[in-house]
Image (cartoon, helix red, strand yellow):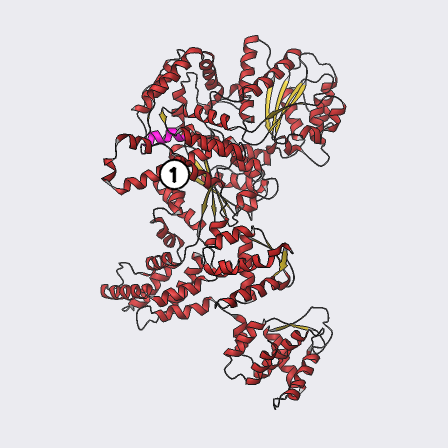
Amino acid sequence: MPAFAALRQFPSSDPTSETIVAVTPRKTRLRSDSDAAIGSPLRKSPRLCKEGTPHSSPTASIRKCLKTSLNLSGSPQKKQLSEDFVERQNWNPRDETQRRAANEALHVSTAQMNVVCRENEQNRILDFCKKCIKEEKAGSLYVCGCPGTGKTLSMEKVKVMLADWENEECIQYPDVLPINCTSLANMNDIFSKIIEKNHSGKKRSRSTSSLQQLQNLYSQQTPGMKMILVIADELDYLITRDRAVLHDLFMLTTLPFSKCILLGVANAIDLADRFIPKLRSLNCKPMVITFCAYSKDQIINILQERLRAVPYTVFQPQALELCARKVAAASGDMRKALAVCRSAIEILIGDSMLSSLDGPEDQHKPAENVSMSNQVRIDHVAAALSKVYKSPVVDTIISLPQHQQIILCSAVKLFRGGKKKDTTLGELNKYYVDVCKSTSIPPVGILELSSMCRVLDDQGILKLGQSRDDKLRRVTLKVDGADIVFALQGVRFFRNCLQ
Amino acid sequence: MGVENPAEVAKFIIRSRIADPLFVYSYFSQLPDSNYSKLKYIISSSVTEACNNSVLLLGPRGCGKTAVLELVLEDLLKEHPDMISVVKLNGLLHSDNNCALKEIARQVCMEHQLQFSKMASFDENSKFLLSILRECGLAHKTIVFVLEEFDLFTEGKQRLLYSLLDAMQSVSSQAVVVGVSCRLDADQLLEKRVRSRFSHRKLLFLSSPGEDFQRLAEHILLLPMDSRLPNDFRASFNEKLLNILAGEEFKGVVDQLCYSDSTVSHLLRFLFCAVCHMDLSSGSLSIQNFKSALPSIQRQPKQEALKDCSVLQLYLLVCMKRLEVKEVELCNFNSIMKEYKSIPDSFQTCDNFARNVCLRAFEHLLQRGLVSFQDNRGQGQSTEFRPVKLLISWHELQQGLQSFPSCPVLLHKLMAREG
């Protein structure tokens, strides 16, 4: 089976991991298969694992093996790359296992062994943490960037790298507390979580809140207190009107005997400036690391890295480049790029299914043509991009029933000239009746008109206000007039009407 | 039980088919490139390949989004028993985060026969959700989250959406999130974080009248092989039906029907009405049934009210319209009477009724809903002095006059003078 033969080559160049046992392919690909392929000898059943720090989670054992394979990365990887170039076979989209392999490689949740294009930022975070731990001082760091730029992924990597470094240097490693601030029911829970983690032995007194307890603890010298590394994801959920919680959280790191290293992750670049001005005056602003949106080259790099796990050429290079260009120009969001690639694969599969229904004439095609047609081409990627970025408004307007199209047409005529932006239902009715009179369609009454407007309001094309009297309800267009004109240009009547 | 009239049996069969959404939408499952097959591919690939996915179903109300989803889920449950578990949430009921988590916990507990405690706190419920996702991921069981009225979940801080979509980004869970909404821009309402985690798959349910409807009607109305129906009856019924459906008149009726609303549920109502009009003695559907079903779907309540009016009431309505055109400020019964009295002056007519007769007619107009008081303030005053407004438009009044059986020519003239 080509799939497993190629996979076998990868870890065999790495002497520390085990060889894979040949597994007969099952119909449903189980998740445990992919873990086995990476070759983790220390894998225990995750059900037996207790909840605890990430150090005892099952993924840690897998990561230990990944780390060993990374450490020996020098020559075996180069050898593997050249092997890849020779080995690259043609991808057959009709083969289920190959299709699955490609989809798995491009799925957002697939764990990545090498995190490319973020080495710089990761090293900076790692250096900051190392410095704080060595000097046993507290500090705060703020990571910001648009969604899909690899922040959480990098934090995971940093945790792993930090654990290795501590193992090497034999330093007592701090407790790590990852919190996602969306899961906090109450803002102040974050402090009680910190206390629980760090000082689970100490009894909680009823009279003081967790915040006060923490402040008391950190104001006195307590020997032997372990450092705690708090990773707070989606920090802007903690923003309240008086910004107290966020402020107090960052202030914890400024107390004289504080042992808390705070890494905050959020989207807003100026969170520290806008919401925590006092810190600047105390001269302890958190260090800010910005994760810029991915550029075209970075996206191509990452996609190629992912596709390296699949031993076939799935994409033509121009197709990958088109995808990277478009996504980088729009948002630089890696998740979108992966979604576009998966969508393009699906379009290719759909096409190949349809062509296989065409019959045996295709067998006369020359061999190279078949191999070309089996890869994802530019037109597939273009179709996938348009599906992701196009809005469904134009299609929906084209398929609306006639009276609703006449309503939209009369609304466009009303709002033309830019004099007013909204009108009443009664006015719209007048224009609507005029438009209906110019063709010979009988107009519907005001009741039916108002219910049709409500249907359009439900769909988000119009916006209907509230009023006691039906005729006085305010109506606004939520869709651009140009879109409506474009959608209706196929019908001659509307074309003449909207000239 | 005597010999049943086969026409009655046929009527019963067709009506029960129309009322069963799974049968109706199974027509769409036969089309190769329909939304049914796309949705089925998405969910089944998540089940077999153990990957996470999210998809949004968009379309106007009544176009069959939920029905197609139910059909897909039912088919998949038959194909992969015990590998799918479904959690259904509705934006109207569960848009609050706490409520939604509790409901998810309740449904999961019910399905897996676990103990559900109503006292569980928000923290416990969210931990439960994460652990159930992990366990189901290990057991290779896919959870399908169906979020109806998806746009209502996007109000507020979108915590539920974020936590669901974020859990799907990890390898340990195996879930599909299906959002159903009638707002086209539902994914624009998402926050940027949530939108980044959403996979941008959208399936548009656009209603396609005309050709498709003819085939859908055939699918529903053609009688199947049934033991209660004699074969020759069935053959003749089907033949006559095919002739009607292919004819021009039927197309005209369907076009008129689709002017205002072309969703599938509207068309189903029309078919049901037509079948109810079926004449049992003739034993088959005729084009007349479809034509008579049309006005009962497209009702004009004001026209029906106008048909029952007396000539005097029509006079009063026309006088009110003339006052409106003259832009008289105060329109109450007294001013209407003044206008009414002025008619015999300009035209030679003997239609002149006494004041109390007119008042009676006016009160009847009020009761019928063609005229109403401007506001509820002057409750104590008598009917003659309170300001009133017309509830019927110029065009509807004109149409009503034209279809009135014995409308005096004078009224037309009066209407036309102002028009």
Majority secondary structure in the magenta region: helix
Of A339 and A367, which appears nearest the observer? A367
Q: Amino acid at mark 1?
A: Ile
SS for dot 1 = helix
Task: Give x and y (percent) for residue A238.
Answer: 66, 32
Task: Give x and y (percent) for residue A34.
Answer: 40, 24
Magenta span contains residue A99? yes
The quarter of the image holding the N terminus of chain A is: top left
- Does residue A202 show up? yes
A283 to A397, vertically: above or below:
above
Of B404 and B66, which appears nearest the observer? B404
Residue at the disc numbered 1:
A347
Magenta span contains residue A468? no
A293 to B355, vertically: above or below:
above
Task: Give x and y (percent) for residue B142.
Answer: 43, 36
Q: Quadrant of residue A279?
A: top right
Task: Give x and y (percent) for residue B161.
Answer: 54, 39
Give the magenta range. A93-103
Q: Residue at x 48, y 51 (%)?
A: A396
Numbered marks: total: 1
